[in-house]
Amino acid sequence: MIINIKVTNEDEFVPNNQDIAVNFADDSSFSFTFWNNKNKTLEWYSSQAIDLLYISLAVFAADRLVPRSDAVDGWSRTIDLYIPVLEISKWVLNCELLEKMVGFLSGDYWKFHFRKREFTSREIKHKSKIEKSKKTAKTYDRVCMFSGGLDSFVGITDILENGAKNNLFISLYGGGKGTKEYQGLLKEKFIEKYKLEARDFHQYYAKVVSGIEDTTRTRSFMFFAHAITVASSLGKPVDLIIPENGLISLNIPSTSSRLGSSSTRTTHPYYLKLFQELINNLEIPVTLKNPYQFYTKGEMLINCKNKEFLENNLSNTMSCSHPDNGRMLGEKHARHCGYCLPCVIRQAAIKKSHLQDDSSYRDSGFVSGETAKMSLNSYKLGIEKFNRKYAFMTIQKSGPITENIDRFMQLYIRGMDEVREYLEGIE
């Protein structure tokens, strides 16, 4: 599949045998809000970070526009992406690394073709606004991802409870309203509890207007790229905190059936290693850190620095992989399905931590229909086949683990035990 990306209406480039064209200057093609935001920053974004942002948007667009059912094997697609960049020499040098990283994330075969461009009128206008307002911009010492999920809630709570000042929290949402609702609610809770400012939270939007493929494994690349681009404007090296439990990070399928759309490699150690190498090569002074790489979700909850605040806000966090599905059933508000893998790991963690859970689940007993029952059978089969003796090999299923092997093995075992203890209570 040959996809051509444009960032201006004036770009007349058309590759041979083009299949799809995406124009980021046309909201009817791809809608995103990065340049529409009123957030103030100390400096202008680095050119290579802007390129990274557009590349991530392009990858996400391709991910949504090309159905996996069209692939020869029904899953892994071959995608040639033509895209204009500001720092072409840096991207040519790092093209192979980028292809490797994105290919690992999505499970597809990517080929990137770069062409030189200059700043667009929209970018120049935005830069002018930053120059005029940077005297009133706030300085930040670190950036943290804020998804609206339970892990990011714990991560932000721990940062604030540890007394860290000058934190910038980055959120992203797409077509559905569920994620945005939870992000907005939690934002107000954090502002009230920790005396934060509204400008400490940046929320961005991105949607492929005609997207048809639902697996969207590459959404995290776009999420991180927004944060990295903003971080490049802070004028100093900063950490980008990505709070996610280690079991989800390892992305180990419970059975062979979990190798599909539910298997996401968002924070897999190998993916983050490749991503960090790319950022370093591009000379963007951002360090990716997941403080919970060796914690199960239950351990994250148990060790949270403010258990009372956590328990009071469990129901305000969203972990479900498809929170908006209930709207098609006539429900007015987004809520957890109760039986997708993130929902199961969430409920197992809450049970492990002995917290009172007032969250709304459509079906936490796996009784609502065939999908729920098949999911339960899949999880139980995975637990039945789980063997501690083979943990060394199992943790390699989703990607190479070459460092801290014993710690990852023990993490995996503890995580599976958490899920097993939860499932044992369900008939």
Image (tube, grey):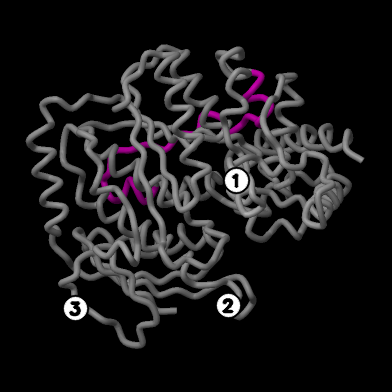
| Secondary structure at numbered mark 1 | helix
The reply to whether the magenta stretch includes residue 286 is: yes
Res 139 quadrant in image: top left
Q: Taking 305 as reference, is 46 left or right?
A: left
Q: Taking 37 as reference, is 10 left or right?
A: left
Horizontal and vertical percent position of residue 406: 68, 36
Which residue corresponds to mark 2?
71
Residue drawn at x 60%, y 18% as measured from the top left: 312
Residue drawn at x 70%, y 24% as measured from the top left: 357
Q: Disc 3 and disc 1: Cα gap in Å?
A: 40 Å
- Residue type, mark 1 in image: Pro
Horizontal and vertical percent position of residue 115: 22, 70
Span of residues in magenta = 277-302
Residue drawn at x 76%, y 42% as measured from the top left: 363
Q: Disc 1 and disc 2: Cα gap in Å?
A: 28 Å
Residue drawn at x 71%, y 29% as measured from the top left: 349
Q: Disc 2 and disc 3: Cα gap in Å?
A: 29 Å
- Residue type, mark 3 in image: Glu
| Secondary structure at numbered mark 3 | loop
Q: Earlier in the sequence, mark 1 or mark 2?
A: 2
- Residue type, mark 2 in image: Ala
Horizontal and vertical percent position of residue 25: 24, 63
Which residue corresponds to mark 1?
323
Horizontal and vertical percent position of residue 191: 40, 19
Q: Taking 407 as reference, is 101 left or right?
A: left
Instruction: Point out the residue furthest to the right here.
Output: 427
Q: Residue 12's mark? A: 3
